[in-house]
Amino acid sequence: MKYFAIAICLLLAVIYHVQKTQEGQNEVIVQRSSPEPAYAEETNETEVKDETTNRADPAPPTGTPMSAKRRPVKRIRDAQPSKQAKPTEDFSPTDLNQLVEFGQCPKCNLQGADLSGLDLALVDLKEANLKGANLTGANLKDADLEGANLEGADLTETSLVQTSLKGANLSGARLVYSDLTYGDAAGANFSGADFTGTKLIDLHMDGTNLSGANLSGVDATGVTLKETIFDETTKLQGTILHDNRDFNWKSLSRRQQCEADIIAEGFIPECP
């Protein structure tokens, strides 16, 4: 009986020892594993912070961004990355940056700038200085160029559809194969401009100066020509002048009347 009691005591001691050992191991496991959740939480916070940082918009540049109505189809910097305008000593890099960032630069100086091939749709360049600028192949659809100086500018194959050129100076400008359909050029100066192959259908040209301009072969159907200035040097060989409201065909010389294709009220060509 004595030995049985001793055996029972030893068994209980072993069981107690085993339980203590297991509890010690569990504590070690918990201590080793506990930093992992903390690390995971820290990692998650970092990821959230980084993700938030990535989503944050860059700080807006100085100035007032253009409204939705005046926003271009694409920003200039995205339109032709390989054909960014090349600064010259004639124009202001600050004005160029404003045009790139905001799509508007009224009264800015871009004289002689190379803007060829760029998407300038809807931009505001009212009264801007674009004298001698290269705008070959540019998209200026719905742009505002009212009062702008485009003297001697190259607008070859440029889209000027529904563009405002009211009061603009385009004397000596090259408009070869450009498209001015549905635009407004009332009061503009086109003296000496080259319109070879240009589309002028339904363009408003009331009060414009076309002295010395070359409109040979141009389709000017529906163009409004009230008080438009022609002189002896205006070239109208094969120019289509049909349905031109308020067109004073009597202001043309007999030679010009015979060279052009005119359909107007009361017009009877007296050609040899």
Image (tube, helix red, strand yellow):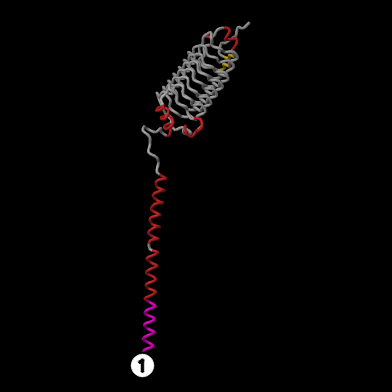
Vertical placement of residue 215 versus 108, above or below: above
Count the labels in the image: 1
Q: Nearer the viewer, residue 198 or 42?
A: 42
Image spot of residue 233 (x, y percent): 53, 9
- Crowd class of label 1 (few under 14; some 14 to 19; many from 20; radius 10 Å): few
- Looking at the rendering, which quadrant does residue 263 occupy? top right
Report whether 27 appears left or right of 257: left
In the image, which residues are magenta?
Answer: 1-19
Vertical placement of residue 221 versus 40, above or below: above
Image spot of residue 268 (x, y percent): 59, 9
- Looking at the rendering, which quadrant does residue 265 occupy? top right
Q: Nearer the viewer, residue 267 or 87?
A: 87
Q: Residue, x 37% and y 69% (percent of image)?
A: 27
Image spot of residue 45 (x, y percent): 38, 53
Amino acid marked by disc 1: Lys
Image spot of residue 131 (x, y percent): 45, 19
Quarter containing the C terminus: top right
Q: Main secondary structure of the magenta part?
A: helix
Secondary element under disc 1, as helix, strand or loop, is helix
Quarter containing the N terminus: bottom left
Q: Of all residues shown, which one is farthest toward the right?
A: 272
